[in-house]
Amino acid sequence: QVQLVESGGGLVQAGGSLRLSCAASGRTFNSYVMGWFRQAPGKEREFVAAIGWGGRSTVYADSVKGRFTISSDNAKNTVYLQMNSLKPEDTAVYYCAADPSLVVHKTAGLYNYWGQGTQVTVSS
C-alpha cells in the first residue's frame, strides 16, 4: 500500500499563491507517476498536473498551464504543486494520486492510490 498525505491548502485572494505538498509513504515503486486532481462542488474530479518520479516528464491541464508548476523531491518522497495567479475558479478540493506507471498521463481511473484531499479556496 501507498499512503499519500496532502497539505498546504487554505484560503487565498485572487492573484495569490499557494504551494501544495503530497508526502508519499509505504510501498515504493521503481518508477511511478504522481498526479494532482481537483474537484469543485457539484463538478466531476478533473486532472490538474502530473509528473514522472524522475521529474523529467510533466503534463498540465490547459486551464492551469503557465500558472501551476508540479515538481518532486525524491529524497523526501514528496510532490509539490506551486499555484500562482490563483483564480476563484481554482477553488476545489485538491487530491494527490499515484500510479506505478512509466508513462505520465491524465487518466484518473488509472491512478491506484489517492490522498484524502486538501481544500483550496480562492476569494474574489
Image (tube, rainbow, N blue to C red):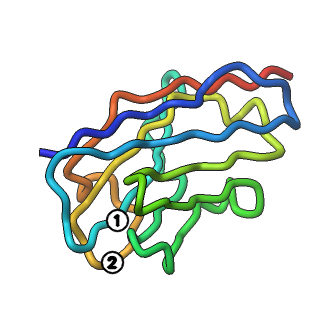
Return the mark for residue 109. Answer: none
Please state if 9 lies on the left or on the right of 65 as rendered. Answer: left
Name the residue nearer the viewer: 75 or 116: 75
Q: Residues within 10 Å of mark 2 (few under 14, many from 20)?
A: few
Q: Position of residue 95 (x, y in %)?
A: 43, 38
Determine the residue positioned at 50% across, 60% down: 72
Q: Amino acid at mark 2?
A: Val
Which one is nearer the viewer's eye here, 63 or 6? Answer: 6
- Label 1: element kind: strand
Label 1: which residue? 33
Q: CA distance from mark 2 to mark 1?
A: 7 Å
Vertical order, 63 against 83 (above or below): below
* Vertical placement of residue 60 versus 40, above or below: below
| Residue 18 locus on image (x, y percent) | 71, 37
Q: Residue at the location (55% across, 23% down)?
A: 119
Q: Disc 2 marks which residue?
A: 103
Image quadrant in which you'd find residue 99? bottom left
Q: Quick one: quadrant of the C terminus? A: top right
Q: Name the residue rendered at 80%, 20% in the picture.
A: 123
Helix, strand or loop at disc 2? loop
Q: Where, quadrant-wise, is the N terminus in this rendering?
A: top left
Whether pointer 2 and pointer 1 mark residues with C-beta atoms closer than 8 Å, the reply is yes
